[in-house]
């Protein structure tokens, strides 16, 4: 089967595959730039840019190297450097940025990403009602919200059309097998009616009522066969995160990659998160320490996400998400938080982005020489 290109706003993606945005430091310049260079859509995560390149771009750090406050954790200078380096790899190919709606200073970070050169903004972790306002000075930037239900898409389109005269340029519908934060409550993640195969068709039908923009399926999509399955259900493309962790170009630390490679199916769990949504990752020493009450103390240095309420929710769940994701980026196995999708245990090797995309397009047994 020959896949059709994905048209998102004014931007044409040759391969209908979106690399999921993964912070802190999992999808930055090397990964996103390499994915876009190969014809898919590389996506830079705007989360935690203050730790990029050993905190070289953060203006104020604490003694232990933690970026101080929102301006430093979401460093504009670092984000610009990440985009500049990604452009050296992919040139003028479309390049996306993922900005979580739950973060503090969302509108500012979105504007920073647009100024840095993002062609497409992707936002989940909440219904991004202010997305068009944040991007009003950048009419060529395409807007792609992430939803988990047709109802959520309907609400968003109504609000956007009424307030801004605009609808999304594409929508990502994400099922509860994805890595990181989910769009459902903990118990809802296991219900059959909330799985991707069930929620995708209603979102496809809802999108048609608002202009028939592309629908991109995400959450548990793993291989060529899964892509074909999603397209048979009406998707125009797919978003995949975890498989890109298993690439040489992925910006994650070797410790992060090896943690996913070693994980068994039973090691991958849904956890409580200070963001207010359940999050999926590998159960490690950190979670054992949380259960024992010996995890690192929550100090809320970065003030990263609004739902955390300045560290109150972090204290309730037993860990600071900014600090623990930063530790994973730094390769600290004992205190790092390692997000992965439900299929992460299937990751068995590290290959190039080029080879991975070839397998996704032509099948798992395909080699680059074919």
Image (cartoon, rainbow, N blue to C red):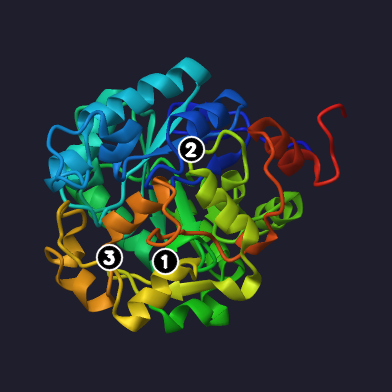
Q: Residues within 10 Å of mark 2 (few under 14, many from 20)?
A: many
Q: Which residue is mark 1?
A: 182
Position of residue 238 relative to residue 59, above or below, is below
Q: Earlier in the sequence, mark 2 or mark 1?
A: 1
Label ID, residue 107: none
208, 37: nearer the viewer: 37
Q: Could you tell me if the residues under marks 2 and 1 are in contact, i.e. CB atoms within 8 Å?
A: no
Local packing at callout 3 (Cα closer than 10 Å; few below 14, some 14-19, many 20+) is many
Residue 181 percent location from the top left of the image? 40, 63
**Residue 30 placement, left or right of 39:** left
Residue at left 48%, top 77%?
A: 189
Closer to the eye: label 2 or 1? 2
Residue 268 percent across, percent down from the top left: 55, 70
Res 261 seen here: yes
Location of the N terminus by quadrant is top right
Q: Residue at x 44, y 84 (%)?
A: 187
Front-most of 118 and 54?
54
**Secondary structure category for the residue under label 1:** loop
Residue named by callout 2: 251
Q: Is residue 266 above or below residue 344?
A: below
Left/right placement of residue 145 relative to residue 161 reads right
Disc 2/disc 1 C-alpha distance (Å): 23 Å
Helix, strand or loop for disc 2: loop
Left-right relation of 272 to 68: right
Q: Position of residue 105 (x, y in %)?
A: 15, 46
What residue is shown at x 45% (from left), y 81% (from top)? 188
């Amino acid at each position: 089967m020959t896949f059709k290109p994905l048209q998102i706003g004014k931007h044409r993606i040759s391969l209908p595959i979106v690399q999921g945005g993964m912070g802190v430091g999992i999808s930055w310049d090397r990964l996103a730039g390499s994915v876009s260079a190969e014809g898919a859509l590389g996506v830079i995560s705007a989360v935690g840019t203050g730790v990029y390149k050993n905190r070289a771009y953060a203006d104020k750090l604490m003694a232990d190297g933690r970026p101080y406050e929102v301006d430093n954790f979401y460093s504009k200078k670092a984000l610009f450097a990440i985009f500049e380096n990604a452009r050296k790899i992919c040139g003028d190919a479309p390049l996306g940025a993922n900005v979580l709606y739950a973060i503090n200073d969302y509108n500012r970070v979105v504007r920073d990403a647009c100024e840095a050169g993002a062609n497409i903004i992707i936002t989940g972790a909440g219904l991004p009602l202010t997305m068009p306002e944040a991007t009003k000075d950048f009419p060529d930037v395409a807007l792609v919200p992430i939803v988990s239900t047709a109802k959520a898409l309907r609400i968003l389109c109504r609000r956007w059309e009424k307030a801004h005269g605009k609808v999304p340029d594409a929508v990502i519908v994400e099922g509860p097998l994805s890595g990181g934060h989910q769009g459902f409550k903990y118990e809802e993640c296991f219900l059959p009616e909330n799985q991707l195969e069930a929620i995708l068709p209603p979102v496809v039908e809802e999108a048609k009522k608002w202009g028939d923009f592309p629908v991109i399926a995400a959450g548990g999509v793993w291989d060529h066969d899964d892509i074909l399955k999603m397209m048979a259900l009406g998707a125009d493309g797919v978003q995949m995160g975890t498989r890109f962790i298993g690439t040489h170009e992925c910006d994650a630390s070797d410790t992060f990659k090896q943690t996913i490679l070693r994980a068994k199916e039973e090691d991958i769990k849904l956890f409580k998160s200070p963001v207010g949504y359940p999050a999926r990752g590998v159960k490690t020493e950190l979670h054992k320490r949380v259960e024992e009450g010996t995890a690192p103390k929550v100090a809320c240095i970065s003030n990263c996400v609004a739902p955390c309420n300045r560290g109150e929710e972090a204290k309730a769940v037993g860990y600071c998400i900014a600090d623990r994701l930063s530790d994973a980026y730094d390769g600290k196995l004992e205190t790092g938080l390692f997000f992965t999708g439900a299929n992460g245990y299937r990751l068995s090797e590290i290959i190039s982005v080029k080879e991975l995309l070839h397998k996704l397009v032509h099948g798992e047994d395909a080699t680059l020489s074919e």
